[in-house]
Image (cartoon, coloured by chain):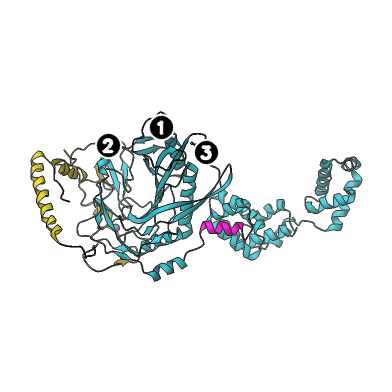
């Protein structure tokens, strides 16, 4: 729950109204309407065939997996799944669109309605909000244009042409850049939980258009809006919104009108500029795709898809905080990383003190995996062994401090916790009589601080505890040392 | 709801289709458009009050395939029919204005309405 952008309308008489259109590439093995491989980073124009090149006489055939995943996403977002749906042609000419039309969905999308529950932190604590969805539909992606440096030409790579693309259209339900950012992050998380997309913004598997208007606070009227196209990072979305909301407020404050237009965001300059192009180009002349038969989702099919849904992030967050009693912070960190959450839950099977395990997973395990750029599952300690280590700490067999050394020594092997602790000589001493002897010895050696403690100087207790710890070479259980020092001094 | 075919309408469609047309073409196309629309317009005379709208010309639904990768064309073959290529990419007139991802909904924007652009 990172705290992000402030709200540019704060302290102004305005309120921003934000809607988002997200494009999510599905990670099916093959493309939407042909058998070409769906893979990022291949040699240009090697993953193409007559269908995705739009050669005359070739015919598209629907990838069933993509249809199923689209419905799965819809079910996870509480959408109504269309029992009858179809594809339509969206006609426009652009070099990266070989057929001269994009196969998309117009009036009968796969999913209608629905909502996404988001949460984020701001000054008033954790905010939970439901962002409504208008629809989710399936379409094909376009190719990629590359602008030749020194020559008056552009180059086209059609490997991406025909890759299945989900378009998720939100209601204009958001009012701040941070809300929009939280929504997009949650959308990404939902896709990761469902396993239908990697939503990697660098590779363009999650892209986003935003539309923005500004109105007097309290008004319910929808005013003229602008659209910012092709934002490809969470930060860009938030920065672009900040900039555009501020720009619109200034215009309105001067009493001028907003011009409806399409903008591009320049992340380097942090500003938007008008996209060239004629408005008349938005005349797509949709009509039903005659090459593709309509599609029917049976009740049974939808029910079986509904039953196969995994636990979704919002539900998991509730469970982690509720049933497992985790702090909101730890629950949030775990829910945002699918692999780490799984690691955590597996560790609980060995040792069920959830908060203790969560502390370790979200700190030490996370640091290790971040530092090495790999997932929690790959760092070389099984959830069960990690759980064993956390249990050893809770049982006082090793100090929380020294346990980090034990953790390091457990990476990349299968040795038991006790064995590693023993070998490193890091057993924590929790034996009362041993510690009491050491405490007595220290008290005898330091009459000054002892007097201070009796006069009420708290700091001197810490000094005495420190001396005992030193004498035990750090192995004494600090909790027991403190308890016995107080006992011996009668404070 | 008859559509009135004007020069502007035909030019608009030509621009959307990125087809260059001359003044002479325009005259002829206007009359083509009118004849085609009149022909199709005859359908308006049918009484369709009790007829369900159809989306597709045959009865089949759910014509699909498994998500299996098939061989693609080699690059030489994929570029073979292109008017221009450089052996790796299709080469087209320079596109300006950022939006490399036409993505859904990007407007047409070429540097100049040049060669095959509209008049
Ligand atoms: Zn293909």
Query: For the residue with label 3, is its CB less than 8 Å from the closest atom of ligand 1?
Result: no
- The label nearer to you, 2 versus 3, is 3
- The label nearer to you, 3 versus 1, is 1
Q: Position of residue A482 (x, y in %)?
A: 82, 50
The reply to whether residue A74 is visible in this rendering is: yes
**Dot 3: element:** loop
Q: Do the CB atoms of the residues marked 1 and 2 lie less than 8 Å apart? A: no
Residue A378 sits above or below residue B83 on the image: below
Q: Position of residue B79 (x, y in %)?
A: 24, 51
Residue A149 sits above or below residue A361 on the image: above
Name the residue located 55 percent from the left edge and 55 percent from the top edge: A335
- Residue that badge 2 annotates: A151
- Residue that badge 1 annotates: A252
- Alpha carbon separation for disc pair 1 and 2: 43 Å
- Name, please, the residue furthest toward the top: A254
- The cyan-tinted chain is A
Do the dots labelled 1 and 2 sit on one chain?
A: yes
Name the residue located 27 percent from the left edge and 61 percent from the top edge: A60
Confirm whether the magenta stretch covers residue A315.
Answer: yes
- Alpha carbon separation for disc pair 2 and 3: 43 Å
Give, as a single range, the part of the protein colored magenta: A308-324
Q: Nearer the viewer, residue A490 or A283?
A: A283
Residue A247: quadrant of the picture = top left
The reply to whether residue A476 is visible in this rendering is: no
- Alpha carbon separation for disc pair 3 and 1: 20 Å
- Numbered circle sitting on residue A6: 3
- Numbered circle sitting on residue A269: none
Do the dots labelled 3 and 1 sit on one chain?
A: yes
Confirm whether the magenta stretch covers residue B109.
Answer: no
């Amino acid at each position: 729950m990172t705290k992000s952008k402030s709200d540019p309308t704060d302290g102004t008489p305005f309120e921003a109204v934000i809607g988002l259109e997200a494009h999510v590439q599905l990670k099916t093995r093959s493309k939407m309407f042909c058998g070409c491989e769906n893979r990022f980073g291949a040699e240009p124009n090697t993953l193409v065939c007559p269908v995705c090149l739009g050669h005359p006489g070739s015919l598209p055939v629907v990838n069933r997996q993509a249809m199923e995943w689209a419905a799965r996403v819809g079910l996870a977002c509480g959408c109504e799944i269309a029992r009858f749906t179809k594809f339509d042609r969206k006609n426009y000419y652009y070099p990266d669109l070989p057929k001269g039309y994009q196969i998309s969905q117009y009036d009968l999308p796969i999913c209608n309605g629905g909502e996404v529950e988001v949460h984020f932190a701001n000054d008033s604590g954790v905010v939970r909000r439901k962002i409504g969805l208008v629809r989710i539909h399936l379409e094909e992606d376009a190719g990629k244009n590359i602008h030749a440096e020194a020559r008056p030409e552009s180059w086209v790579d059609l490997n991406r042409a025909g890759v299945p693309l989900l378009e998720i259209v939100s209601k204009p339900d958001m009012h701040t850049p941070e809300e929009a950012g939280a929504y997009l992050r949650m959308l990404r998380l939902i896709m990761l939980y469902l396993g239908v997309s990697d939503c990697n913004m660098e590779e363009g598997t999650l892209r986003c258009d935003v539309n923005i208007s500004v109105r007097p606070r309290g008004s319910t009227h929808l005013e003229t809006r602008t659209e910012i196209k092709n934002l490809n990072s969470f930060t860009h979305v938030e920065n672009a919104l900040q900039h555009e909301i501020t720009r619109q407020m200034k215009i309105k404050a001067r009493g001028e009108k907003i011009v409806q237009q399409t903008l591009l965001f320049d992340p380097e300059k942090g500003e938007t500029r008008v996209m060239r192009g004629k408005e008349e180009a938005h005349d797509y002349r949709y009509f039903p795709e005659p090459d593709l038969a309509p599609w029917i989702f049976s009740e049974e099919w939808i029910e079986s898809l509904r039953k196969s849904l995994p636990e979704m992030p919002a539900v998991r967050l509730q469970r982690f905080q509720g049933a497992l009693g985790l702090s909101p912070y730890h629950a949030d960190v775990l829910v945002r990383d699918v692999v780490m959450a799984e690691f955590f839950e597996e560790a609980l099977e060995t040792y069920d003190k959830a908060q203790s395990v969560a502390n370790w997973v979200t700190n030490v395990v996370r640091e290790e995996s971040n530092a090495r750029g790999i997932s929690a599952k790959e760092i070389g300690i099984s959830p069960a062994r990690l759980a064993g280590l956390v249990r050893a700490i809770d049982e006082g067999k090793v100090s929380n401090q020294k346990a980090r050394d034990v953790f390091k020594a457990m990476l990349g092997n299968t040795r038991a916790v006790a064995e590693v602790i023993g070998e490193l000589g890091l057993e924590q001493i929790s034996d009362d009589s041993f510690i009491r002897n050491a405490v007595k010895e220290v008290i005898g050696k330091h009459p000054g601080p002892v007097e201070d403690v009796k006069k009420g100087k708290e700091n001197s207790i810490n000094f005495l505890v420190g001396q005992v710890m030193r004498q035990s070479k750090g192995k004494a259980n600090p909790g027991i040392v403190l308890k016995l020092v107080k006992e011996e001094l009668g404070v | 709801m008859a559509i009135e075919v004007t020069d502007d309408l035909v030019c608009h469609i030509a621009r959307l289709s990125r087809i260059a047309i001359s003044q002479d073409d325009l005259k002829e196309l206007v009359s083509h458009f009118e004849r085609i629309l009149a022909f199709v317009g005859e359908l308006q005379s049918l009484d369709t009050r009790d007829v369900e709208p159809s989306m597709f010309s045959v009865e089949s639904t759910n014509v699909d395939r498994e998500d299996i990768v098939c061989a693609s064309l080699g690059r030489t073959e994929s570029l073979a029919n292109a008017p221009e290529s450089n052996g790796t990419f299709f080469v087209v007139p320079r596109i300006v204005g950022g939006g490399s991802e036409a993505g859904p909904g990007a407007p047409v924007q070429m540097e100049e309405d040049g060669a095959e652009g509209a008049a």
